[in-house]
Amino acid sequence: MIPEKTLQTLELDKILDKLATYTTFGGGADLVRQLFPTTDLQEAQLWQKETSEARLLLENKTNVTLGGVRDVRDIAIAAQRGVVIDPPILQDIRNTLRRGMTIKRTLGRMKSSYPLLASVAELLEECIDIQDAIGNVLDDNSEIKDSASPKLAIIRRDLKIAFERLQTKLHRILSTPTKAQYLQETIITMRGGRYVVPIKADHKGKIPGVVHDSSSSGATLFIEPLETVELNNQWREFQIEEEKEIRRILAALSAQVGEQADYIVHSVGILCYLDFTFAKARYADDTRSVQPILIPFKQRPNNPNHPGSTIYLKGAKHPLLTGNVVPLDIEFGDETWVMVVTGPNTGGKTVSLKTVGLMALMSQCGLHVPAEEAKLTIFEGIFADIGDEQSIEQSLSTFSSHMRNTIQILDYC
């Protein structure tokens, strides 16, 4: 039993917030914040070994990175319900799956050096069909390729021809002296999705056409010349056809994503776990931490009253403290399982208490601990009641709260 209050009192939440900053993408950060200390020795030992493997992998500068990975689980599930996915998100799905495939194959080749991480990576689904399908539709800038479908290629060819005809006609109007004299400027611009030319308001009607807009001063009218209306219509019709075909292509592609959503969600979950593990490794490196030796409870034959637990810390430092931190050495040996700490205010009693409790919590989260050496048992219960006792004037309500917490701790014990 590890109460939530203990985690807050010993500030594990702050450690996890810091750890989250070492992740590569949101899914890994979410997994960090969900981390809860295990009370199972084998699970804790496995987590510790994974962290150590990740540290070794980073130290050896292997080409394993989660750059480009995104948490696309929600959109993949949405695709099952018929949601059409936008091109940039489809590209995120492809990049995420490609990165997962690269990591799986890279770690697979190094399985003898990183067996635990390779075993995790083996669970990644490559979904090559989806990767290829998205790659056939989108270019590297997430734009729809002309070759995405035969129909789209034809539409875009016709669209280009219609555009060139329209522009040629407009430029001819601009370069005709009898018409150019009525123009405010010899430019082609656009209003409401139609190409227009700007004419002086007092020459309205000199160039027959449809008025689409006027300048703020009213001195300029934006006219679509009558002789370009049909060309504008053709160009716009091809645009609408293009939009419909792109929508159809994206809908079909999104349906494929929906069919593979379970595999995509599974793979992203694995990538989240790897990101989480690499974050633990980077945090351990930055805090100069060591892997704690985790051991089972062992009764002391010479002292049957001893609960069998072990706490040994050498050179331990509270990871949230900065500056010249005084390290802590502490050992609960064969004859010791309770310790009373006394001393003056600001003498370090509270920091010492928090350091010991936090080292235990971090160990049971698979985190390496900032110490020179560490040996700990896995505790089924970790409890703490630490308040600000610096003030003589402590309110009754605060005192009562401490008493209630102490009673609960004793009841658990």
Image (cartoon, helix red, strand yellow):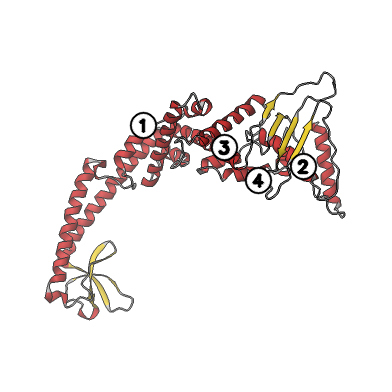
Q: Which mark is residue 128?
A: 1
Q: Which mark is residue 36?
A: none
Residue at point 82%, 33% (across, down): 411
Q: Which residue is mark 3?
A: 281
Tell whether 16 sits left or right of 222: right
- Residue 173, given in percent of the width and then of the height, sits at 15, 69
Q: Nearer the viewer, mark 4 or mark 2?
A: 2
- Residue 184, given in percent of the width and then of the height, sits at 23, 76
Q: Which residue is mark 2?
A: 352
Among the 4 quarters of the image, the one containing residue 18: top right
**Residue density around tag 1, few if under 14, some if 14–19, many if 20 or more, within 10 Å:** few
Does residue 3 appear anywhere in the picture?
no
Of labels 1 and 4, earlier in sequence is 4
Hey, what amino acid is under mark 4? Answer: Lys
Tell whether 413 sits left or right of 162: right
Mark 3, secondary structure of its residue: helix
Alpha carbon distance from label 4 to label 3: 17 Å
